[in-house]
Amino acid sequence: MYAIVEIAGQQFKIEKDQKLFVHRLQEDEGATVSIDKVLLLGNDNDITLGAPAIEGAFAEAKVLGHLKGDKVIVFKKKRRKGYRKKNGHRQSLTQIQISSISASGGKKSAPKAEKKAPAKKAAPAKEAAPAAAP
């Protein structure tokens, strides 16, 4: 079974016992994280698609640790102008391990044609008869 989930603004394809790096999460090391935004569930040839997310489906993950990613150097230069600017960046990351994927409450992706009954029109309100003038 696999799922496509959204964690901290990024989409990931996850499976049980998979380890992955995501943007920094607030939880402490060893804590369990529940991922509620499940966009797609797949089990062999059976696929469940959400619009945009599947109601009731979730994934559980354990926080393994917090670390920083590789250093990225940003160097800007304009020739013949004497302009040089050097910047560096290291992204804060969290390593998580997927412990379970639950599909409870999921709906099938096959669209069903639902026929809506035509709405009954309300009878027009009768106007009040004008009062007789004396």
Image (cartoon, grey):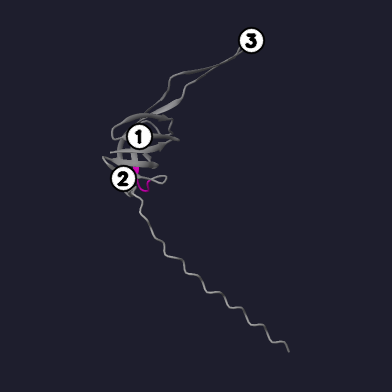
Does residue 18 appear left or right of residue 83 in this picture? left
Return the residue at label 1: 13
Judged from the image, the secondary structure of the residue bearing numbered disc 1 is strand
Of the 4 image quadrants, the one containing the N terminus is: top left
Q: Residues within 10 Å of mark 1 (few under 14, many from 20)?
A: some
Return the residue at label 2: 103
Query: Disc 2 marks which amino acid?
Result: Ala
Q: Are marks 3 and 2 in contact (CB under 8 Å)?
A: no
**Extreme residue toward the right, this view:** 134
Q: Position of residue 106 (x, y in %)?
A: 33, 48
Return the residue at label 3: 80
Q: Position of residue 37 (x, y in %)?
A: 40, 42
Q: Residue at the spot x=31%, y=48% of the render?
A: 104
Query: Disc 3 marks which amino acid?
Result: Arg
Query: Disc 1 marks which amino acid?
Result: Lys
Q: Residue at the spot x=34%, y=40% of the render?
A: 59
Does residue 71 appear left or right of residue 134 in this picture? left
Of the 4 image quadrants, the one containing the C terminus is: bottom right
Q: Which region of the structure is painted magenta? A: 54-58
Residue 86 bears which disc, if any?
none
